[in-house]
Image: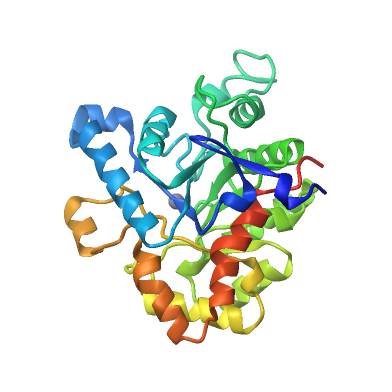
Amino acid sequence: MTDTHERTVSTTTGEVPVTGLGPTLMHEHLFVFDAELERNWVRRWDRAEQVDLAVRKLDRAYDHGIRTVVDLTVIGLGRDVELVREVGERTRVQLVVATGVYTFNELPRYVTQRGPGSMNGGPDVLGALLKRDIEEGIAGTDVRASVLKVATDEPGVTPGVERMLRTTAQVHRETGVPIMTHANASLRQGLAQLDIFESEGVDLSRVVIGHCGDSRDLDYHRELLDRGAYVGLDRFGLVHLLPDEDRAEVVAELCRQGYADRLVLSHDSSTYSHSFEPATRERLGDWDYSHISRVVLPALAVAGVAQEQIDQMLVRNPMAVLGHDGPY
Ligand SMILES: [Zn+2]
């Protein structure tokens, strides 16, 4: 195990010491869109305008104490690392990026039509592509992925999703880079994810199960936590899924039960996203990267969460997850 002080984390502006991460939002997005749909149908995207908006939103979060934001936008969500880097050069917030394929079912044909038994044959490409993003850099840049992202939702662990989960686990063990997931909380999908990671020999303390905060099912949370995983309470502001008061209550209760050292906080917000019609987004109000700092932390304090526990969730837990121990 390396001394925490020597470890660094890749950001879009270079390596930063893990001790320099500061208050960190562990699950956010800058731009989520399908470039093909955007070009052909939606036609709302204005690059210069959106880059400016992202910089303004991130700087606002910086003014409210946030120092690092993890952008979990991977293949399937519209990743464009040049775009993220451009924002990273202009904002005071440090941006960490991820690699992975976001799918609830099938993998892209580029992946399935290569590898043993496929039309093109040759070696499996999925793991190689994830590793390249982590070890060499994404899309020809020197920006390296510091997180592996994977998703499981309504269809469950389909063959495509299982391949993604297993490949993610293997690349995690080869690189040491932590795993952060999207998991449907009402279907308790985080447990199925942990089962597969465990069967691949993953140390579950290096996994963050995402979107747990969508559910008030504390048994689900405790089951994940007791197996050693981190739990993401990472959709503050998505009030149509669960009101913030309920989300805050879950955090406060888990802190009371002694789990603050395994919780991370975030919004799953975005500057631009195809998931929301402008009117829908409007209804969510002032839901940006500073919402937790402005609104949620004061509510947590009222609910009895100590400043020490807030620092744990926003600073020390992200340091522990991102400043990982390396391959094993
Ligand atoms: Zn997300």
Residue at horizontal 47 percent and vertical 62 percent from the top? 234
Residue 11 percent location from the top left of the image = 53, 39
Residue 118 percent location from the top left of the image = 63, 19
Residue at horizontal 77 percent and vertical 45 percent from the top? 200
Residue 167 percent location from the top left of the image = 67, 37
Residue at horizontal 72 percent and vertical 58 percent from the top? 205
Confirm whether residue 237 shows in the render.
Answer: no
The residue closer to the viewer here, 109 or 220, is 220
Residue 45 percent location from the top left of the image = 22, 35
**Horizontal side, residue 307 vs residue 179: left or right:** left
**Horizontal side, residue 260 vs residue 186: left or right:** right
**Horizontal side, residue 63 vs residue 97: left or right:** left
The answer to which image quadrant residue 99 occupies is top right
Confirm whether residue 176 shows in the render.
Answer: yes
The answer to which image quadrant residue 124 occupies is top right
**Looking at the image, is 163 positioned above or below residue 306?**
above
Residue at horizontal 75 percent and vertical 35 percent from the top? 174
